């Protein structure tokens, strides 16, 4: 096991018992995700090999990053941290345990007026420790009919500050039908995750051009996913 | 429920798989030892998956009625998931579809387990088909309503109703055949699946004329005729372990292999319509559970009713 990453707002490193509980909880969560959605990973643009990456995906459900995390090979999973909302994940003790100890989430504060640390700084700090990230550049969950919401600029800033890291688009299909907004019980349909070819920021590429290129790359995976 | 005949059949299947495994390995060693030939790799993946499926079936047979019912309930669940992943649905259908997975499916198999023929034969075509659209309608959303309802109903018909007729064979009461009904299941699955395998083999060896090129490029007339006849002959030759005479066994084997082939064709049409090649990904080399079950789905209810009317007291 790797040492848990220490982001600035993290508590001190957990004790052995807590770390063990986190491993067991992680296995239980991935098993549950597999039973509920039988997730299928399609590596159409890139291979699941250990390389530092930012996986960026469409966001339709709170289960999104759990699925990406589940289908990653264990070796990659241990070095991959989701970027998640601090106000949600620290709201209750159990959530805080799952968010911080199991997923080792990079917790960012969505409320600019309250936050002490810049989200991009926190994510770059995680990258500098050698970890990969899971990021939802739409920012909020997509509840509408449009397949994808316009990206926030975080992805661009990460690409500019750490240009060597692969940006891997991941299209997650069907999760909005498995767990539509407002429903409590998931419908056990098959979920497909399509991992596309990595992107990098071109020299002097403007922010808007890069973000629309990143959006197009993600949307293109929707068509080539095989099962819907 | 163990009978020497079941052991013979399982031993025979294991023998066939040993031969197939040797052929697969020899082909790989002779033609592409580095695993570069996709046809040979797929063949070996299929054979490996067959071992798994046969072991699972054998364990269920040894576990008796409960084992068989639970196994087919799980297969139904996996098949239903594959089917409903592809059908049209709206948010308004969420509760109706949850009902299919978590109420209709367990209830159907429980009724099969307690042998309540009067209810398990109408639970889906009467109660589920009438009540599920009601649940969807109560939540509004008329867009594509008929298509949504019809596709969900077909999912239930194929994946729950038809599949449940395999374990339902255990509830038939055939005079002089008490305690051996599990052989009927083994015989049905053996005959129908052998027909699928032999269609693949005949098709690869001598297949020329496509059967339905717009539905499935790999199905040929030569494969169909060769597979159906070979498997019917094999099924007929096992008449001594069934309640049937030799000509009866041959006729039933012909019916189930033909129904199985038609099932494969119908399911190919659905896959083509939905733009997919396989139903799923969980059985290596084969695709999804429905890719393997499609022929059994179409053969099982017909076989069940023929045997029920012809041989059973219930």
Image: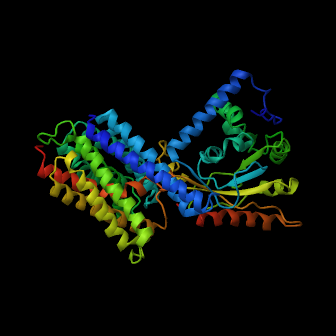
Q: Is residue B139 left or right of residue A178?
A: left
Along the line of sight, the residue nearer the viewer: B151 or A119:
B151
Q: Residue at x 49, y 65 (%)?
A: B276
Quadrant in the picture for the C terminus of chain B: top left
Q: Is residue A109 left or right of residue B36?
A: right
Measured from the top left, where is residue B132 in percent x and y? 32, 52
Reply above or below: A219 against B109: below
Q: Residue at x 65, y 33 (%)?
A: A98
Q: Residue at x 73, y 43 (%)?
A: A80
Reply above or below: B112 against A169: above
Reply above or below: B5 against B206: above
Quadrant in the picture for the N terminus of chain B: top left
Measured from the top left, where is residue A7 in percent x and y? 81, 36
Reply above or below: A105 against A120: above
Residue B72 in view here: no
Q: Quadrant of residue B117?
A: top left
Along the line of sight, the residue nearer the viewer: A205 or A14:
A14
């Amino acid at each position: 096991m790797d040492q848990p990453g220490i982001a600035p707002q993290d508590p001190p490193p957990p004790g052995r018992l807590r770390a063990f509980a986190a491993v067991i909880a992680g296995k239980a969560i991935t098993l549950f995700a597999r039973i509920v959605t039988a997730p299928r990973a399609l590596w159409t643009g890139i291979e699941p090999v250990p390389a530092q990456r930012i996986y960026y995906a469409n966001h339709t459900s709170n289960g999104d990053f759990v699925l990406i995390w589940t289908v990653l090979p264990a070796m990659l999973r241990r070095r991959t941290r989701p970027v998640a909302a601090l106000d949600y994940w620290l709201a209750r003790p159990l959530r805080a345990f799952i968010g911080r100890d199991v997923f080792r989430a990079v917790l960012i504060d969505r409320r600019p007026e309250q936050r002490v640390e810049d989200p991009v700084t926190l994510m770059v700090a995680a990258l500098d420790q050698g970890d990969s990230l899971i990021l939802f550049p739409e920012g909020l969950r997509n509840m509408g009919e449009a397949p994808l919401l316009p990206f926030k600029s975080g992805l661009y800033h990460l690409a500019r500050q750490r240009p060597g890291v692969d940006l891997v688009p991941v299209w997650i299909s069907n999760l909005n039908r498995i767990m539509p907004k407002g429903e409590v019980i998931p419908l056990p349909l098959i979920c497909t995750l399509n991992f596309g070819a990595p992107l990098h920021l071109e020299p002097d590429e403007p922010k808007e051009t890069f973000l629309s290129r990143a959006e197009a790359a993600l949307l293109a995976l929707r068509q080539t996913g095989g099962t819907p | 429920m163990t009978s020497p005949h079941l052991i013979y059949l399982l031993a025979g299947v294991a023998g066939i798989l040993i031969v197939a495994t040797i052929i697969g390995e020899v082909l790989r060693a002779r033609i592409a030892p580095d695993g570069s030939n996709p046809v040979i790799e797929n063949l070996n993946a299929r054979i490996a998956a067959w071992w798994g499926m046969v072991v699972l079936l054998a364990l269920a047979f040894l576990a008796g009625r409960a084992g068989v019912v639970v196994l087919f309930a799980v297969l139904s669940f996996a098949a239903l998931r594959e089917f409903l992943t592809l059908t049209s649905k709206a948010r308004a259908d969420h509760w109706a579809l949850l009902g299919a997975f978590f109420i209709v499916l367990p209830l159907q198999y429980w009724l099969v387990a307690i042998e309540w023929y009067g209810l398990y034969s109408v639970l889906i075509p009467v109660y589920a088909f009438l009540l599920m659209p009601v649940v969807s309608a109560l939540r509004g959303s008329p867009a594509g309503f008929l298509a949504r309802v019809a596709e969900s109903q077909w999912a239930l018909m194929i994946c729950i109703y038809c599949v449940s007729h395999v374990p339902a064979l255990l509830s038939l009461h055939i005079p002089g055949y008490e305690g051996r009904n599990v052989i009927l299941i083994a015989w049905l699955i053996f005959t129908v699946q052998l027909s699928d395998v032999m269609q693949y083999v005949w098709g690869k060896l001598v297949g020329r004329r496509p059967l339905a090129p717009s539905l499935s490029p790999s199905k040929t007339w030569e494969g169909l005729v060769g597979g159906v006849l070979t498997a019917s002959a094999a099924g007929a030759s096992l008449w001594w372990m069934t309640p049937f005479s030799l000509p009866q066994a041959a006729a039933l084997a012909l019916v189930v292999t033909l129904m199985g082939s038609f099932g494969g064709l119908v399911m190919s049409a659905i896959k083509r319509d939905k733009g997919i090649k396989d139903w799923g990904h969980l059985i290596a080399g084969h695709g999804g559970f429905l890719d393997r079950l499609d022929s059994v789905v179409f053969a099982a209810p017909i076989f069940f009713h023929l045997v029920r009317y012809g041989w059973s007291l219930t």
